[in-house]
Image (cartoon, rainbow, N blue to C red):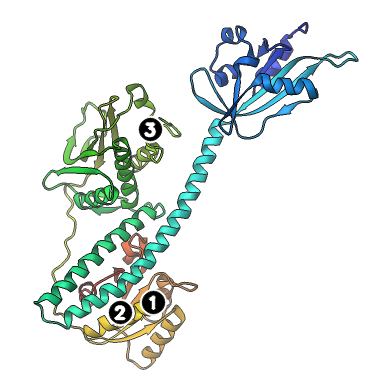
Amino acid sequence: MDFEIDLNLQIILETLDEGVIITDLFGEVQTCNSNIYTILGMSELDLKTINLFETLNFYQNNQKTSLGFYIEKILKTKEPLILEYPTTIIDQKREEHFVKVSIIPLKKTNSSHEIEGFTIFLFDYTEKYLINQELQKNLRLKSMSRLLSGLAHDFNNIFTTILGNVSLAKFEIPSEGELVNLLEDAEKGIENAREMTKQLLTFSAEEQKEKELVEFPELLNEIVKFTLSGSNITANINFDDNLWPVYLNKTQISLLFHQIIINSVQAMPIGGSIEISASNVTLDENNRFKYNPGSYILIEFQDHGVGIPEEEILHVFDPFFQSEYISQDVNFSTVKNIIDQHFGFIQLHSKLGQGIKIKIYLPAEPMVQVEEEPMFHTETKFSGKILIMDDEEIVRKILKKMLTQLGLEVYTAKNSQETVQIYKEHMRAHDPFKVVILDLTIKGGEGGVLTLQELLRLNPSVKAVASSGYATDKVIVHYQDYGFSGSLVKPYKIEELQKTLSKLY
């Protein structure tokens, strides 16, 4: 080959975002820009000592094709060639790059237009590709999240009917005997199902920024039980006495622990155990980790799986980091992000073949007490009128039965318009309702929040209870902020209705 690479051309090549290589007719590299060294994982010396047509391979649909194959096609057609999306290459460090590839024949300027070499453009869009894949994954997860959330909500409506009838039946029979034992067993089964739907709602809930004061053991036990359900892994859990409360976003923390436990489960395919512990710790100003001083709960996870090579530990929390030693269902950068949002810290220790140990420090509140539920008497009876809004007829029916059993005169409405109309009529007759129970989700209509706003305009002193099958709904958690006087999570027993109403009478 007899063309010269001048300085101006080299300067132009360096301004391009793509990696560019110019070869002769036989695959020897004549020049390139510096981007190529990163994309191919080669040095300038490496490129000068190889035949690019034989060395550079492209992968499409798991099929490997050499650059030389495409060069042969261009020599026949004498036309440029753009490879189909997606195309990948494996660099000399065994790292994968997603690339857009254009191969342009260089023709002599004489009348023969013979090909004398080739320009290969490689645009590395690996980061954009991975971001797009992550976005697609998140969209799929959100779709699945909405599906799970809707299913859990519908299940809770069904469980409300079953649990309500069981609790009512217990009122109608003697307190001892085989029949009451059967009903209590049925109640326990529904309680277990209720816990499962609660966990489904927790994991399917869209991210919320609200944090609440949480007693840690109960939360972690629930997550461990749910995540290990159906696996051949056991958990050995050890909590210090009197663990301090922590302000947590339960949805985020549930996801965090779920990710860690899932990784451990998949690292031990033939079974095993995970040691989980939690303790109170106080870090002083001169702590060796250079963490902010203060009170923390230290949570430790130790599995006995394959572990991670020490050289990979520094990259575990990097976005898009992938390793054969970490489950593809787990994203440790998400774990780190959640801990950062809680102003905590995480450490990961591992050696290949020795499992993974993870330590998490979460800021605690040693001087704050979680409020205990006040005691109430199960024989409590009420009087007066109560109004229920729920779009499910079967739910309205069982709630009416339970509230009637508690001594109340019950009116029902299936939507916001009916609710407001009934409430108005009783106000005009100077016969107001003592309490209203409003379902937060009404299909095709205004839910409990908007309905309460209209009722408050009629009567600023209205006492309303928010009711929902979505345990993670922020209105259920922070009902006072929306004007409600209490909240109920479906399904609920007659005793739970009693407890809520006793606070309002």
Judge by depth and name the residue closer to the eye, 86 or 220. Answer: 86
Quadrant of residue 193 within the rendered picture = bottom left
Q: Which residue is mark 1?
A: 390
Question: As shown in the figure, which amino acid type bears the numbered disc 1?
Answer: Asp
Near mark 2 (Cα within 10 A), the count class, few <14, some 14-19 or many ≥20, is many
Q: Which residue is mark 2?
A: 399
Number of residue marks: 3
Task: Name the residue located 49 percent from the left edge and 21 percent from the top edge.
Answer: 94
Please give left or right for residue 325 compared with residue 225 in the image: right
Task: Name the residue located 72 percent from the left edge and 9 percent from the top edge.
Answer: 7
Calculate the distance from the C-alpha at mark 1 to the C-alpha at mark 2.
Answer: 10 Å
Residue 68's tag is none
Judge by depth and name the residue closer to the eye, 83 or 75. Answer: 75
> Which residue is situated farthest in the right direction here?
111
Measured from the top left, where is residue 239 in percent x and y? Answer: 15, 44
> Which residue is situated farthest in the bottom direction here?
429
Please give left or right for residue 324 compared with residue 193 in the image: right
Callout 1–callout 2 Cβ contact below 8 Å: yes
Question: As shown in the figure, which amino acid type bears the numbered disc 2?
Answer: Leu
Callout 3–callout 1 Cβ contact below 8 Å: no
